[in-house]
Amino acid sequence: CPLNSHYEFCSSSCDVTCSNLYAPVQCMTQCKEGCVCDEGFVFSGDRCVPISQCGCLHRGLYYEAGETFHPSGSCEEQCMCQAGGEVVCKAFSCGTGEECGVVDGVQKCHPFGSATCSASGHPHYLSFDGVSFDFQGTCTYILAKTCTDASDLTPFTISIEKEDWGTRNMSVAKLVSIQVYGITLTLLQNKQGLIMVNGVSHNLPVIVADGQLRAYQHGTNILVQTIFGLTLSYDLVYQARVTIPGSYEGQTCGLCGNYDGQQDEEFLLPSGRTASDAAAFGSAWEVQIPGASCTDRCAGNSCPVCEERKKNIFKGRNYCGLLTDPDGPFMACHGLVSPSVYQSNCLYDLCLGNGDAQVLCQSIHSYVTACQEAGAPIRPWRNTSFCAVSCPANSHYEVCADLCTSTCTGDIMDCPETCAEGCECDDGFFFDGQGCVTLQSCGCFEHRRYYKPNETVLTNECQQSCTCVPARGVTCKVHGCSREEICQIRDGVRACISKGTGQEGTICKMINAQPECVPVSQATCWAGGYLHYHTFDGRAYDFHGTCNYMVAKTCRGDSVLPSFHVTANIENRGNTQVFYIGSVTVQVDGVTITAARAEVGFVWVSVEAHLPISLNNGALRLYQSGTSLVLRTDFNLRVSYDWNNHLRVTVPRVFSDSLCGLCGNYNGDLSDDFRTPDGDLAPSVAALGKSWAVEDEDQFCWHDCIGGCRPCAPSIARKYKEEALCGLIAKVSDGPFSQCHSKVDPTVYLDNCVYDLCHNDGYRKALCEALKAYADACQLEGVRIGEWRQLCTLENSQYQLCGTACPATCVDQSAPNSCKDPCVESCQCKDGFVLSQGKCIPKSSCGCQFEGRPYAPNESFWVDEACGTRCMCNAATRQVECVAATCKQSERCGLVNGVRGCYPSSYATCSVTRNLHYATFDGQRYDFQGTCRYQLTGLCKKVEGLVDFEVNFQENNTAPVQIKVYQTNLRISNQFPGKVLVNSVLMNLPFNLIDKKISVYRKGWATVIQADFGLTVTYAGWSGRTTVTLPVTYMGAVCGLCGNFNSDREDDMLMRDGTLAPSPISFGQSWKVGDLPGCSAVTIPPCASVEAIEKQQRGSRGQCGIILHKSGPFRGCHSKVDPHGYFVDCVYGYCVLSGRESNVCQAVAGYAEACQEAGAMVHPWRTTKFCSPSCPLNSHYEFCSSSCDVTCSNLYAPVQCMTQCKEGCMCNEGFVLSGDHCIPISQCGCLHRGLYYQPWETFHPSGSCKEQCVCQAGGEVVCKAFSCGAGEKCGVVDGIQKCHPFGSATCSASGHPHYLSFDGVAFDFQGTCTYVLAKTCTDASHLTPFTISVEKESWGSGNVSMAKLVSIQVYGITFTLLQNKQGLIMVDGVSHNLPVIMVNGQLRAYQHGTNVLVQTDFGLTVTYDLVYQARVTIPGSYHGQTCGLCGNYNGQQDEEFLLPSGRTAPDAAAFGSAWEVQIPGASCTDRCAGNSCPVCEEKKKEVFKGRNYCGLLTDPDSPFAACHGMVSPSVYQSNCLYDLCLGNGDTQVLCQSIHSYVTACQEAKVFIQPWRSTSFCPVSCPVNSHYELCADLCTTTCSRDIMDCPETCAEGCQCDRGFFFDGQGCVTLENCGCFKQGRYYKVQPQAVWV
């Protein structure tokens, strides 16, 4: 009985079927014998399935799950029965070349029409579109394949291999193969009754792919048919024919053409161009087969030619003339199949074959086949003297032979409708695929294949043996090869083959592009993916442990065999379902070698060393091959590890039955591979893993997924099996790996790939790794694979799919020449470069070799374990020089991260808290409230062996901490969380620099920068605390605010000049670095009630008191870190900031951090009510997280990090950090040349803009050549290397009617409407569009206008500045307090002196003083791209007055009106008419030219003299005269007019002298502020350090000391509001609807 059913002799109940669960059907009650479904199973069709897998009942009919059908008797609707009984229908129509009808009992769209192509005789081809041509090649060619990716068509490839025929230069078909449904069927010349299925020989008939593909004998031809209408027919001698249905019209390519109905475009090359001739066309479709020797065409005179005289003989009726004879046996066919092509082929072949009768008969038979396929009746044409057929015993010749109704296989399929001539069995005999036999001598048809009587076949990698017993059927039993044998397909038969030498037991591999027979005398075990194992004997399993495991080792106490151990340390990161190999250790020949994940090019042999290495006199070699480390021994053990996720161990046959571990015992029997160390069989994979775990100091390891391993949902698995993903492994027709399927079974690799993608949510890197695993396995078998990717981010390298496995290195530059290994996929170094430490370096940069290991130029190392001899590789001589040396007193000799050296014996830390309380290295505490940039610490005494460095600090700056070390400048910036500025370029954390001399990473809420000599700087944005840790070797050699680190805290206040400072202020100021505008040393305002508060807090257990609380969360720390200073910090913050909780929290967090750094036990202190932590999306708070942050980039390449615990936000399970967001692993970005980029980030990698790369989702980087546009240059702006505009232009609208265009043209225009000042007018795609408009209004009684409002539209937002509305801005019509930051910081507005500035990230700036003048500055990249009153910025002054239509305006008035913005209902005038235009009398003007009026602007001794060379004052002076004249000398107008020139000068960075006084243009500043010529409103704002301060000066009111600017006035700190989501909220109860 079939699966899930059992036999019952008398079953009287009705069968339970899926459909009668829905609707019972009447049935007989008398009993019947039969198979009945088991309990819990029901019939669906003819299978027993669980009830949950039943299909659907639709309009009374039952359909199986997954079945697609057309219910209404037409094809206008297509329905699908989904699992669970739901039917989903949609409108449908048949495709081109298809019609609706019933085929094989199923209503469906089926193709109508068809086309046939043939390859016959010696060089003759006839395409689908009827074009005939001859081509003499003897290689393998693609006859026909699908060439478009039409999703509704099944892809196929049909190829033909030709061989030389006779002595002449002619070819004949040797084999024909068809690839479809993932299966390859091959028909071999003269191999009667047999077919190869995926390389294994089968008897005909064969039915595979669930009946969708079948092959059988039809007359003398063999037919291969698919259910979609593709038929291949081959007579095993002369002709192959391919018939395809009409639905493939225009979708094919190959020698058979594109089937587009046109005969003129037949010779298309794979590239789509037309070939010059048939020979070029034929060669283009050659299939490259490694090692095949074949010719593509005959050259010149050697091409066979047939003389006309000879041809005429063969035109007679007794030769080829029979085909065209109007009264001959084929006359009924002439109207259906034209005989002319067949006749000319016949003449040619017969001529070259010198009248060979066999050639004549084959040629005529090819026409007979075509006629019979077309359904034409043929009269008998053979006789005993002409083309007689000799039939085997018990059969006779028929023109229409029936081999279908009387076969041994019985009625397994419908018989063909067409005739075919051939041998038919005599009555009472049956056809068995090769001859006619009696019924008793028939074999068995089972498993969709035919077995001859008593034939035994090995299946399932020789693990099962099946035999056909006549009349009883096929019986199968377990089988296995002996230890001396190996399961292999030899000549189409799968068999156990002796591992002896010579031809027996050898396998063909490509070595140096030549095929060679190499002995099959080894086995490979591998572990890979996330995480799959495959033993030496071929058992595959998945195991999810995270410990250190014995993968393979020698087990028998056999003294003859050398011993080895291979262990792997398995880790998991960010996802409890995903595992990988963290490191691999091999112990062999008395040496222990470890390779750690991502450390490409390096291994550890007691110390870290770089490849290649030769040990024990060459008995042990380590080198990089492709992307993997290879370890080889002289006894043929080979271990390869790709420094990531794939480990392979290959052992020679002598080790059979001598091994143990996760790889099994290598005895040829996979059933006993789960043996534990004590010899028992493990009951489960987890138990097997646990038994082979190696003792390790890491207690936190387990042998299964936490919470169980989740299976992959079938729907998701189906998605990942598609061709675009894992399906590529098994893709047959033109799949890159199709040549490999017969050598390496793709099933395991496909399943592993699906598993890995499933548990990594489709993470693209997992896909690449899974595909690479199969690609590597294929290449190791010597199979040539197709291109499946392009990758190489390694500088100075190029991608090679099949590159040398032995790359040139410094040690052996000619290694590739003597390489014996199969090729590997790799990034091969370009000419002139060699592989060193995982990088391609110029040959000239190679260093020295010492004791079998390479060293880089100037690299120094200790050779002995006691650090007594120090050696260095001399760059000039390339020789290693050694001297006696010892460690300093403050150091000890040790191994750190694999490097032996002298390491500091202790460290000290200096810290600064958010409230500027300092604690020096020696423990001195003081307060210093300076706002400038200061040196925290740096090397002052140059001492040999100490690396120079400097750490600077500036409170309240966007980049508070700056570090200079190793010629690198690093800045930690508040503005860019998750990033650090390196030499002004922003980089995503974490990363390593200069060969890991500098490491930068995140730890909880802190950013950590470490240098290899022991310097560590941390900055915790959360608490605002900064620490610097130095090794004891720097004792007494440093200086700065952190003191001199000499163990004496009394002399820590040393100033820069070496004297002791009288006070912290003078000490602090002496360490000032650089001059920053507006910074100062602030005296600490005393806090009136500090003593009372301190007393109250001391007694409390909450707020600051928690720090001192004897049984509080910090009780375990008091003895290690004195809490008093931190408590005083906290009280001070509480007092000054009137108990604001955030300051108390920062102070407490500072103490908690110090405690955790000191290794003290701290208990959780945050609660939902006190300092509750808030974490971003997809993350959670952890009080003491000791693991490294899991980030996207350390999934690829781990970064060293501290293990001490830190509080912070950790990503949730399944999420990892990308920058400062937690995202699913599958959405991670890219690692490119060691740096991490976020998904869709665009970057220029090489420090120039010649190349632009984009990081695509899934970790793929795509780069292209690039250059900057006009008006742009390449450079670093805001931390990003990019093209940025150089040069800029400013346009202004000032005073009453004055305009000055971008190109410097000044004009007056009196309109009082709304006008476009400037906007982008071309659609240059790389420029951000903007529009700036100004609304003017009448001023005073005269016909004079002035600006009423200025509006800026950019990034889809409208900002509006209103006249005299101080401190406010309208954002899309809603009033906001300044400052405002929008669009992720790309757009911001803030007060600068008396002006309001609106700035964009692309260089557009709008300045408005809210009264008199508006200025627009645009970058050079907008050259020639703008229009409006400001002109077109094309550098020409003569074409300034352009109208929107592009024509030139007659005058300024017409120009101005043309740019008016129509506003419904606005009453305004565009110009003053005639005499009413205001005019100024010259006499009046003269008065105002004096030095006490407008003359001040041009006076050579005026305060503005320094500016005259930068900004010409003449336009400003004439504007001043005009406005003052019309304003009758109004001083306010005068002051505004002069201020407009001051703004222009200060923008141009010119330093001007004070020009205002109490009597001339005084400024009245609001309370708590005073006038400054260069007012700093940025470093002292309530919104604090939200953005970089402007570099230019602006005159205005500056807050007095201790006060802060809140957008309109100066207030104390406690009266400051809040800055949130890019806008500022005032303190007074100002609820805002958002």
Image: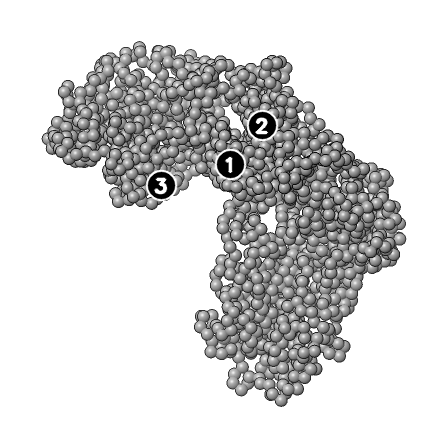
Looking at the picture, tell me which residue is in the foreground, 815 or 900: 815
Residue at image position (62%, 22%) is 589
The kind of residue tagged 3 is Pro
Sequence-first disc among 2 and 3: 3
The kind of residue tagged 1 is Ser
- The mark found on residue 671 in the picture is none
**What residue would you read off at disc 1?**
826
Give the class, few, some or many, for how many residues have Cα within 10 Å of label 1's Cα (few <14, many ≥20).
many
Quadrant in which residue 1301 is drawn:
bottom right
User: Considering only vertical position in the picture, is 650 above or below 942?
Assistant: above
**What residue would you read off at disc 2?**
621
Q: Is residue 478 left or right of residue 448?
A: right
Looking at the picture, tell me which residue is in the foreground, 1418 or 153: 1418
**What residue would you read off at disc 3?**
270
Q: Is residue 530 visible?
A: no
Sequence-first disc among 1 and 3: 3
User: Considering only vertical position in the picture, is 1559 above or below 39?
Assistant: below
Q: Is residue 1179 left or right of residue 765?
A: right
Which one is in front in this view, the residue at disc 2 or the one at disc 3? 2
Which one is in front in this view, the residue at disc 1 or the one at disc 3? 1
Distance from disc 1 to disc 3, alpha carbons, whole Å, reads 27 Å
Whole-percent x, y for residue 1340 in the image: 63, 81
Which one is in front in this view, the residue at disc 1 or the one at disc 2? 2
Sequence-first disc among 1 and 2: 2
